[in-house]
């Protein structure tokens, strides 16, 4: 009886103690089995959640409709999350991102394979032409392929993730210190600090935190910006944008560091600034908000910013005009030495860029066509009017008994003497041939216009570019050189090597073949290839650099500075690109242009129409038939005897 109250107390207390212990164990136990969810909470916001109770966690990112969002879990307490072209590895126990990589295109499928993941990447040339490649991503060996993607919106994923997720942060022009309300700071700063803690691999989250601190007048902002610049997983496509943005915030030291790190990554990925021709690509990659009027910047800072743009895209659209205008400005401000440098760069852009090329002469060809057409019509009318009286006399004589026999009667041509016929035919032939020249120009312009955007963003790697080179350019040795360079930059060195061996007339072939051999450890063969490149073209600076000689140009100097241990590729020179886009050598183009108006944009149409009536005749023979028919007509016209004029 004495123990009865004790037993009653124990019966009441023990279950409660056990329940408390179990609840505590469950709270601190790993959340390996917890469900991971990806949800879109609004049009511009998505969340990844996991854990439960006190161990619940959340990752928050801004988004847009054009970005794919995929989440797959793996054994071992991790998950793969892709957003646009970015892939993240998430530790689902801790609710933290432990890896982050940028792929060259939109990620459309993820398939875990143990600790690795199969990543399918998409690139588009049009809605009907979609190219996909599959890669195996290993967190322990983060080797990710690279090529420029034509879907330029993918270059903004990392910025959108920060901007649209925290609308309270003003990414617009800098506010005056202290203009942000205390309530905004109290709410946004802890959230951003938690976001940075959960995803330390995303530099733009730190940029958002730094911007909020800067607007609040918090001195920690500068330190946060510096941390963002040195995030190890930052890609050069991010660093260029970060550099431009930090310049807008007048964080010059951090901006300079971001650009230097970005430019090193830019060159290490095989990019060549001389191949960066697409202006919109440059504006996206090095996006400036121009929150500060460039004219208000100190001259030293302005020169530094323009120098960075030049390093990325020296020969792009409008480059010649831009550098010339800047040289004029320097001349007016009495900085003659700098003006000469930029004037030389403008001349180099004019001489080396293949953005427009011979297309600048298209207006001259059109004027010649109009002039020759007008001259032919006027000459014909004058001669017709001149010989009209004689024609009437001839008709009257023929109608009389015993009159003259009927002759060739067509617009009084039978009265033209040989000199008049030759003059008329000369004018017609000038217009005809010039129409062929203009058609060739237009054909080349259209080929350039159809070029994948990625092909004009400092490298010719990528599936869309490979398809375009094979299917949209005429078969010429120059096209072969472009294809070989594309294969090499795409990592398909065996295909590139075969093509280079078949193009010994180009110095670029020997230099780039030497790069392949050197990377394969064949030092002696590589050296012989570089020496042969210099024998073909003694001025090839890339081959000289690869032989250990001092840099001979700005680009070889930059290559030696940033990726010094890598041999340097030689991009196809401008005349090679011209011949690839415009159909071969000058002699070959002249033969094609003898087809007159039937060459160029109308040639394919004429060939298709002719194919409906002339079966079995290859399209390449159509210009030959046209030229033969034209020559026969001209011969007949010249051989027609002239009537005597009375």
Image (cartoon, rainbow, N blue to C red):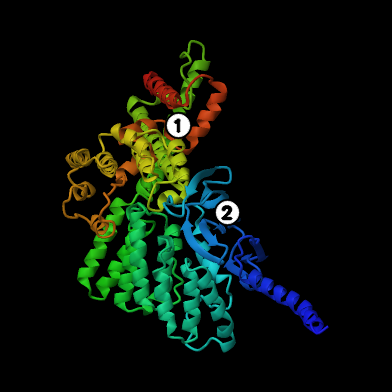
The x, y position of residue 544, in whole percent, is: 19, 48
Inspect this view and state whether residue 646 appears: no
245 vs 81: above or below = below
Write the residue at 31% across / 63% down.
323
The C terminus lies in quadrant: top left
To which quarter of the image does residue 233 belong?
A: bottom left
Residue tagged 2: 75
Name the disc covering residue 292, or none.
none
253 or 89, which lies in front? 89
Residue at the disc numbered 1? 384
Instruction: Name the image quarter holding the N terminus.
Output: bottom right
Q: Secondary structure at mark 1?
A: helix
- For the residue pair 296 and 15, the one nearer the viewer reads as 15
The residue positioned 52% from the left and 59% from the top of the image is 88
Q: Spatial distance from mark 2 to mark 1, Cα to Cα?
A: 92 Å
Q: Residues within 10 Å of mark 1 (few under 14, many from 20)?
A: some
> Height in image: 576 above or below 34?
above
């Amino acid at each position: 009886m004495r123990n009865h109250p004790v037993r009653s107390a124990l019966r009441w207390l023990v279950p409660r103690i056990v329940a408390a212990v179990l609840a505590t164990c469950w709270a601190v136990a790993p959340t390996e089995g917890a469900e991971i969810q990806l949800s879109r909470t609004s049009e511009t916001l998505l969340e990844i959640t996991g854990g439960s109770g006190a161990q619940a966690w959340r990752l928050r990112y801004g988004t847009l409709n054009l970005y794919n969002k995929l989440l797959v879990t793996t054994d071992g307490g991790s998950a793969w999350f892709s957003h646009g072209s970015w892939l993240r590895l998430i530790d689902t126990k801790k609710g933290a991102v432990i890896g982050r990589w940028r792929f060259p295109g939109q990620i459309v499928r993820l398939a875990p394979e143990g600790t690795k993941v199969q990543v399918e990447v998409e690139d588009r040339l049009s809605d009907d032409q979609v190219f996909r490649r599959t890669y195996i991503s290993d967190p322990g060996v983060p080797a990710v392929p690279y090529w420029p993607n034509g879907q330029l919106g993918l270059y903004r994923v990392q910025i959108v993730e920060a901007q649209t997720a925290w609308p309270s942060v003003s990414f617009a022009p800098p506010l005056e210190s202290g203009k942000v309300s205390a309530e905004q700071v109290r709410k946004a700063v802890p959230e951003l600090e938690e976001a940075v803690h959960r995803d330390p691999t995303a530099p733009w989250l730190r940029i958002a935190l730094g911007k909020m601190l800067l607007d609040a007048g918090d001195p920690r902002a500068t330190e946060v910006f510096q941390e963002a610049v040195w995030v190890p997983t930052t890609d050069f496509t991010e660093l260029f944008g970060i550099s431009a943005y930090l310049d807008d915030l007048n964080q010059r030291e951090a901006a300079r560091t971001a650009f230097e790190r970005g430019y090193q990554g830019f060159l290490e990925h095989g990019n060549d600034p001389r191949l960066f021709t697409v202006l919109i690509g440059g504006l996206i990659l090095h996006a400036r908000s121009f929150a500060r009027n460039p004219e208000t910047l100190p001259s030293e800072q302005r020169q530094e910013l323009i120098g960075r743009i030049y390093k990325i895209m020296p020969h792009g659209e409008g480059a010649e005009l831009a550098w010339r205008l800047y040289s004029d400005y320097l001349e007016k401000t009495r900085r003659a030495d700098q003006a000469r440098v930029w004037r030389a760069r403008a001349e180099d852009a004019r001489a080396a860029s293949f953005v427009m090329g011979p297309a600048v002469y298209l207006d001259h060809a059109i004027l010649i066509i109009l002039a020759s057409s007008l001259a032919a019509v006027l000459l014909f009318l004058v001669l017709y009017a001149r010989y009209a009286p004689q024609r009437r006399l001839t008709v009257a004589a023929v109608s009389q008994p015993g009159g003259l026999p009927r002759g060739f009667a067509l617009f009084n041509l039978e009265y033209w003497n040989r000199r008049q016929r030759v003059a008329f035919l000369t004018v017609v032939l000038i217009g005809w041939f010039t129409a062929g020249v203009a058609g060739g120009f237009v054909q080349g312009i259209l080929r350039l216009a159809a070029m994948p955007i990625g092909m004009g963003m400092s490298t010719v790697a990528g599936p869309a570019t490979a398809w375009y080179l094979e299917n949209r350019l005429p078969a010429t040795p120059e096209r072969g050189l472009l294809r070989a360079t594309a294969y090499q930059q795409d990592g398909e060195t065996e295909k590139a090597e075969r093509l280079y061996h078949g193009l010994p007339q180009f110095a670029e072939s020997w230099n780039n073949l030497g790069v392949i051999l050197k990377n394969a450890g064949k030092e002696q063969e590589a050296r012989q290839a570089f020496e042969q490149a210099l024998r073909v073209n003694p001025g090839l600076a890339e081959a000289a650099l690869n032989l250990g000689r001092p840099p001979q140009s700005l680009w070889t100097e930059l290559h030696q500075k940033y990726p010094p241990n890598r041999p340097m590729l030689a991009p196809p020179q401008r005349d090679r690109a011209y011949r690839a886009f415009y159909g071969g050598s000058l002699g070959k183009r002249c033969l094609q242009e003898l087809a007159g108006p039937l060459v160029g944009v109308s040639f394919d149409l004429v060939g298709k129409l002719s194919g409906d009536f002339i079966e079995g005749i290859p399209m390449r023979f159509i210009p030959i038939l046209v030229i033969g028919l034209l020559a026969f007509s001209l011969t007949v016209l010249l051989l027609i005897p002239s009537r005597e004029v009375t």
